Image (cartoon, rainbow, N blue to C red):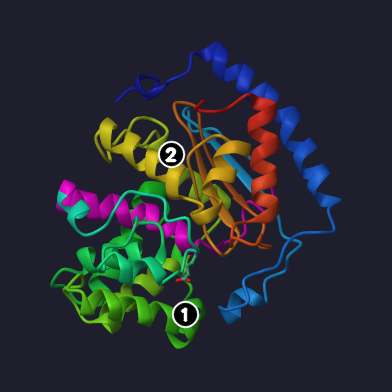
Amino acid sequence: MDAGHFLLMTTDQLADVKFRLSEVLPQIAAHLSQRSERGQVAQYIPPLARIDPGKFGMAIVLNDNSVHAIGDAQEAFSIQSISKVFALTLALGKLGDGLWRRVGREPSGDAFNSIVLLEHEKGIPRNPFINAGAIVTSDVLLASHEPRETIGEILRFVQFLAEDSDISIDPFVAQAETATGFGNFALANLLKANGNLQNLPEQVLGVYHHQCSIAMTCRQLAQAGAFLVSEGRNPLNGFQIVAPERARRINALMMTCGHYNGSGDFAYRVGVPAKSGVGGGVLAIVPRIASIAVWSPGLNQHGNSLLGTEALEMLCKEMRWSVF
Ligand SMILES: NC(=O)CC[C@H](N)C(=O)O
């Protein structure tokens, strides 16, 4: 198929965006390199607590497949909760709207790992991006398979989206999460007690902790997210990954729930759909224009990347990118 078929910007618009990026990206890198306050790297997952908070990378994929990158954009990091976007995409493919009988679509206003609402709301998590909701999504993907088959399915999907078979799971992170994820076990047990898990908590968490432990570079992540930019079609290879309507809906969930109880602030400051992870990564989508991955491991009080958010705020302001 003709690559031009997928262009959602005219050639002139693309040239203009590329020119502005060549000016703005070095400014962002220079500005952030001077910041001494970089947030705190996640402490509760031991291998993440050892990551250098000085790291910073950003990659932008435009829908002609050109990649514009700065900093440590070629260094793999733990994508953590960003994996929830890919798992949700697969789960919607399996269950369609049936998924919404088991998970809600509302922001929680609580921390990503909160258990409070889950008891109140009888085991139906508020949305698929908080841990409880993502654990249900993992259960859907597990269905009656062996955990390792489902883990392989998620990994292969991400590799397929990024067209990169080098993407892998960090076994040390997966092991550490399983050894220390007592809060996730509490969530999974409460889901099971409420009849909202079909499989055993340890099997479901085997899937969930491994999907969170996928390691990717900014470049790979921005490429894997590109189907959300172009109405569900992967601009790398032209495959229609999801229907345009589904891509819009995944973006809507990223906008309303992608940053947990920091989602309102992120929408206000940045203004595009995005999903964060406690590894310090953020995947942000500018519909019809760009897929952006940024990585800075230090987190703010909500567990979202402090400088990653700031970088996106600067970028979207300078490029005048917003869905509003
Ligand atoms: N916000 C996150 O990235 C959390 C994911 C992490 N694996 C957890 O379960 O706590």
Amino acid identity at mark 1:
Glu
**Circle 2 residue:** 226
Q: Quadrant of the N terminus?
A: top left
Residue 210 horizontal side relative to residue 145, left or right: right
Q: Please indicate, yes or no, whether residue 280 appears anywhere in the rendered image.
A: yes
Amino acid identity at mark 2:
Ala
Q: Please indicate, yes or no, whether residue 70 appears anywhere in the rendered image.
A: no
Q: Position of residue 314 (x, y in %)?
A: 70, 36
Relative vertical location of residue 205 with respect to residue 160 in this rendering, above or below? below
Question: SS for tag 2?
Answer: helix
- Would residue 95 be counted in the magenta stretch? yes
Circle 1 residues within 10 Å: few <14, some 14–19, many ≥20: many
> Toward which corner of the image does residue 271 lie, by quadrant?
top right
Residue at the (40%, 57%) spot, across then down? 129
Check residue 177 in the rendering and tell me which mark sits there, or answer none: 1
Residue at the (26%, 53%) spot, across then down? 90
Closest to the camera, between mark 1 and mark 2, is 1
Write down the region rendered in magenta: 71-97
Relative vertical location of residue 125 with respect to residue 181 in this rendering, above or below? above
